[in-house]
Amino acid sequence: MHLKNITNHKPQNWNFNYALSPLEAIFAELKTSQKGLPEAEGVKRVMEFGKNELAKKKKRILIHEIASRFTNPLIILLLFIGTFSLFFGEKFSAIIVYAMAFMSALLSFYQEHKAEKAVEDLNALVRTTVAVLRDGRLKEKNMKDLVPGDVINLSAGDVVPADIRLISCKDLFVSQSALTGESMPVEKFSQCDINKTGNFIELCNMAFMGSSVVSGTGEGVVIHTGVYTEFGKISKELLGVNVETSFDKGIKDFTWMMIKAILAMVIIILAINVITKHSFFESVLFALAVAVGLAPETLPMLVTINLSKGALLMSKKKVVVKRLDAIQNFGAMDILCTDKTGTLTMDQVVLEKYCDVSQKDSSEVLELGFLNSFYQTGLKSLLDQAVLKHEHNHLLNYKKVDEIPFDFTRRIMSVVVESPGKNLMMAVKGAPEEIFKRCSRFQKDGTEEVFDDCAYKSASQAYHALSQQGFRVLAVAYKKFAAEKKVFEPADENDLVLKGFLAFLDPPKPTAKQALESLEKVGIKIKVLTGDNELVTEKICKDIGLNVEGMLTGEKVEQMSDEELKKLVEKVTVFSRMLPLQKERVIRMLHGNGHVVGFLGDGINDSPALKAADVSISVNNAVDIARESANIILLKKSLVVLYDGVLEGRKVFGNILKYVRMGSSSNFGNMFSMTGASLFLPFLPMLPIQILLNNFLYDLSQLALPTDNVDEGYLQSPKPWNIGLVKKFMVLIGPISSLFDFLTFGVMWWVFLGFNNQALFHTGWFLESLLSQTLVIYVIRTRKIPFLESRPGKYLVINTFLVLTAAFVVPYTPLAKVFGLVAPPPFYYAILAAMMVCYLLMVQFAKEWFIKKYGYE
């Protein structure tokens, strides 16, 4: 595997404890200062440590990319057969086989290259510069040129470009949802109590690549760049993950099944004909023609056309399909695992509830919160912004007198305002437990009551009840002052009157409930894998109507063996506080249980799971690595398109399976027919050139299959590959085809005296063989009664008519001599029609028996 940005550069120090060490020691370790690096040193360190980029697979040149499309086993077989045909002088056969192989490979390359270009265009829209101190002056530098020791400035809207230790900050709130799944932003500080933090990502004096600044400002020194960042470690691990999807496995299994059958058949027929016909060259040509006839050479092209058609339809719905086979995996998917933040939710903080201490809705609580948020100075936090979206114009004529800013010790902030009536009031907002201990009274139903132990207990219960519903809760309180008071300080934040609570939430997307309900109706189970806590996750699941059957935390997942987890993943709906590799492990356990798994995510912490899933889905505002890992990207916020994708995938697979069933059963039947004919006929049952023409016309008749209709009932459940079922169908239907081939041999031999007229015998079987193979698709394409209960696509019918017309006209044209065909007597057509009716009825009855015994999925 070719990797970028991992080798040939000096490793960065992971052993030094940047969180616990004083800034002086950090500057010494990184050989820098608070004024940043000299420009020359920055350039030197880029050469020394490498670019600040993530690990990526080295992009192959165009010719290598195209060549990789020819590694499919079936395409290799076609090229092999084509080369042999060319060697033995069968140019017509070689051209057809080569054309099929090249068209399939090039079409696949074109579609996927176009999708990759769309993703690159998306990535190009991301801002890629950062404010860096070089030579003591602030400069805008490309993020790729950051090095350890650089000092950078951060402000609202910035993406943190590397792992940094904070030097100073003011009201700095950072969203780490892409890394941890936590929906609420966290406040960062230049100094903090390390003992109160959990894992490394939660260190409050550190900021990490991939997180984003929500509000405030900060200054930090870069400690790790590129693959040495926490984000980079994940990207590096992903390069080693190559998961075989259900579609890959299904196509591979079918291809090898057909290759083995073809090789066995060719060897048997070659041996029989060499022994009985005593002409090695003629026997080789016949065996090669049989190989071409048996090889499902249109399968790669039909698969690609089907998938390309699906990708085209999805693109009209603003969905980028990066890997074509993801369309079919969409249809086969029976479990969709999804992240919460940014996928099911808006990734925005919204004020959902404002209530008094008894949890009754109260507009007065909202007004008090509005006064506090509106009149405070400095940058507004996300919570303030959510409050201010509820406009109260009548409060804008208040006059601000003073404020007591928020600090980490008090965990509250206060604003003193003067009403139009010249009354002074302090509006206080903050952590409920800090507000409670400063209150002496509380307000209920418009009256003030003593905030005694009983009231304290009741308010605490209300706070915890809201928290358990998944809300981020702030308490609001007030205090009135005499008009002459002019100076205020934290000591004045006592004897408060508790007013109520403001409850915030990252709400579900409007389309999430409808999308998940639609998916469940078509047989897809939903599981939530999130880094957020269980209370918030349970609240969101309830809001979108997802029935939570069981919950499991990442900590418990980590303690379980694979066998234990394999059993539990079937029963559990919600996995919370999950680390990236724990999400991936759950996906692998579901795979191990035989499921086709999809994953919907948008963050860095989702990338391993995206890579491991059969179908990985991301959204347009996802981080680069999530878009890189995904094979389907939603360009619109609506999740309803997921349902459309599933149905499209099932349609695509349904049409591919029609060809697989028909091709395998016809070829299995031809094996018996060719073997019997080679054993008992004194001449070849069909000339090599006739086999090739027959095969060419048959292939043409199947090119319209991607446009065929798919029964509505077929779309209502997941459609995974089932090669065992294909084999059973092949063994049942194939011999029926052979039976009517042998009947044709008998008719041509005894009724039309074919032993005296080989050309007539060849023509009779040529027409019967083509007609039976071409018409049986109308029986196989549906589990219902063809035409009466299930109508085929019009282009399939038109294509079939044109191909059969061409086949039946050839014996009456000058081309007949070229292909060794003659015009059959009129009575032959009557017998042929009767045989076809009997054949199709027998296949229909056999199909109905098969459906009752095995199903038809």
Image (tube, grey):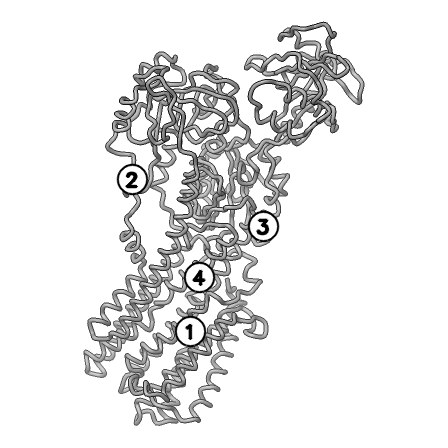
Q: Amino acid at mark 1?
A: Ser
Circle 2 residues within 10 Å: few <14, some 14–19, many ≥20: some
Count how many numbered circles sit on residues in the image. 4
Instruction: Residue under label 1, please give it.
Output: 701
Question: Residue 208 location, x and y as percent?
Answer: 42, 27
- Check contact, mark 2 vs mark 4: CB within 8 A: no
Q: Position of residue 241 (x, y in %)?
A: 36, 42
Q: Residue at x 58, y 35 (%)?
A: 537
- Nearer the observer: mark 4 or 3; the answer is 4
What is the number of the mark on residue 520? 3
Q: Position of residue 69 (x, y in %)?
A: 32, 56
Does label 2 or label 4 sit earlier along the sequence? 2
* Residue, disc 2: 3
**Observer-nearest residue: 240 or 709?**
709
Which numbered disc, 3 or 2, marks the residue closer to the eye?
A: 2
Q: What residue did someone put label 4 on?
A: 306
Front: mark 3 or 1: 1
> Residue 158, relative to residue 243: is it above or below?
above
Q: Which mark is residue 118?
A: none
Asked where in the image residue 159 lies, by quadrant, the reply is top left
Q: Quadrant of residue 742?
A: bottom left
Mark 3 secondary-structure assignment = helix
Picture quarter with the N terminus:
top left
Q: Are marks 1 and 4 in contact (CB under 8 Å)?
A: no
Q: Is residue 792 left or right of residue 279?
A: right
The earlier-in-sequence mark between 4 and 3 is 4
Q: Helix or strand or loop: what does disc 2 sit on?
A: strand
- The Cα atoms of the two marked residues, 1 and 2, are separated by 45 Å
Q: Residues within 10 Å of mark 4 (few under 14, many from 20)?
A: many
Who is closer to the viewer here, 625 or 282? 625
Task: Tell me whether circle 4 and circle 3 mark residues in contact (CB < 8 Å).
Answer: no
